[in-house]
Image (cartoon, rainbow, N blue to C red):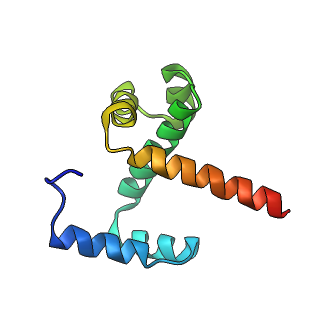
């Protein structure tokens, strides 16, 4: 865990995020918390991470997402040497989709 971001205020922020129960509630919270650009940048990074996980090339990722190669490289570095936050999220979303498909 990055001690540079870990503090009481950040804990409270993440507790608020974790308290959201639905996608709509997340939209409502993040629209109040962040600018549209900030939300789009975070969403873009998550898409880049998912595409890197799917073994897409930098060119494919840049064309689909509009992300710069610097952003793609930064996300790739986090995937390979970070705290596994991207991987955890990617795996959980994959599992949720699998469970939803099984229920159909």
Task: Tell which of 73 and 33 is nearer to you.
Answer: 73
Q: Quadrant of residue 80?
A: top left
Query: Residue 25, image x and y in percent?
Result: 51, 77
Does 89 sit left or right of 64 as displayed? left
Residue at 39% x, 25% y is 69
Q: Is residue 32 visible?
A: no
Q: Is residue 9 above or below residue 74?
A: below
Q: Nearer the viewer, residue 92 or 20?
A: 92
Q: Picture coordinates of residue 52 (x, y %)?
A: 51, 31
Q: Position of residue 13 (x, y in %)?
A: 29, 72
- Residue 59 appears at what percent x and percent y? 52, 20
At 18% across and 61% down in the image, what residue appears? 6
| Residue 82 vertical placement versus 68 (above, below) | below
Residue at point 47% right, 77% down?
A: 20
Could you say which is closer to the camera, residue 20 or residue 70?
A: 20
Q: Is residue 17 left or right of residue 48?
A: left
Picture quarter with the C terminus: bottom right
Q: Is residue 10 visible?
A: yes
């Amino acid at each position: 865990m990055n001690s540079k971001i870990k503090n009481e205020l950040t804990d409270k922020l993440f507790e608020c995020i974790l308290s959201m129960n639905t996608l709509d509630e997340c939209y409502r919270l993040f629209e109040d918390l962040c600018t549209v650009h900030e939300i789009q940048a975070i969403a873009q990074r998550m898409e880049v991470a998912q595409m890197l996980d799917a073994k897409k090339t930098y060119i494919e990722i840049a064309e689909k997402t509009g992300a710069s190669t610097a952003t793609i490289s930064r996300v790739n570095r986090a995937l390979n040497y970070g705290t596994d936050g991207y991987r955890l999220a990617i795996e959980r979303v994959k599992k949720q989709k699998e469970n939803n498909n099984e229920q159909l």
